[in-house]
Image (cartoon, helix red, strand yellow):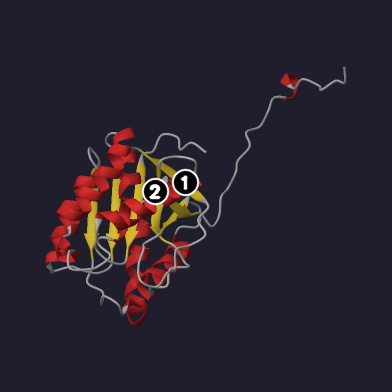
Amino acid sequence: MFLGALRSIALLGAHCDDIAIGAGATLDQLCRAHPGVRVDALVLSGAGTPREQEEHSALTAFCPGAELNLRVDALPDGRQPAAWESAKSAVAEFRRAVEPDLVIGPQRGDAHQDHRQLAELISQEFRDHLVLGYEIPKYEGDLPNVNAYVPVTQDSKERKVELLHRHYPSQHDRTWFDADTFSGLMRVRGVQSQTRWAEAFVAEKLLIEIPAVDPSKIVEARNI
């Protein structure tokens, strides 16, 4: 599958760093391949904290040459299901402001309750769009059965690892937040897609449109 000309991409994350961890290399390649593409991003938590500035600087770096519009809200980290109405309103408002060619957000099988709720809201609001659900490695061992792969160049792989370390210093004390984790998962997904490196996603629904064919140009198959 080849993505055509992209004019607009929508990104959603429950927390600052979710988008970059799940789709950083893909974003890097998409934005380099489509200079000037519009990127609208919604992150539901972190507003008013140092993490908000981390997210601004990180997504600016991960979306080179893009027209980036980032909104960070202040829902409670780790307890977003308790703020369902606020989360629903935020995603609905975001949806009304964008008409993207591609939506990237969490996937509904994620064990983290914040990620899972956001994924469900995305499916409710973005009904006629290509939606790719990213994966985030963590303690729960909930990596999904992915069905969509984006081959990642060596340069994009290295940029992802370096930018994650540079722009999210608040996460350096987490045992899993390191180059081995991010490179290792991209290598495994590369093996599965017969490439060196890849990021992988869950695409729950794909609409395949077959263009109409002029009947006069149909060549009848014949047995010879």
Quick check: 17 left or right of 200?
left
The answer to whether 148 is drawn above or below residue 215 in the figure is below
Residue shown at 42% from the left, 69% from the top: 141
The residue pinned by badge 1 equals 191
Asked if the residue under mark 1 is in contact with the one under mark 2, i.e. CB atoms within 8 Å, the reply is yes
Residue shown at 43% from the left, 65% from the top: 119
Question: Given the image, on which type of amino acid does mark 1 rest?
Answer: Val
SS at badge 2: helix
**Disc 1 crowd, CA 10 A, few/some/many (<14, 14-19, 20+):** few
The residue pinned by badge 2 equals 187
What whole-number distance in Å separates the C-alpha atoms at marks 2 and 1? 6 Å
Quadrant, the C terminus: top right
SS at badge 1: helix
Q: Quadrant of residue 51?
A: bottom left
Indicate the position of residue 41 as horizontal and vertical percent values. 29, 55
Question: Given the image, on which type of amino acid does mark 2 rest?
Answer: Arg
Q: Farthest residue to the bottom: give it.
A: 82
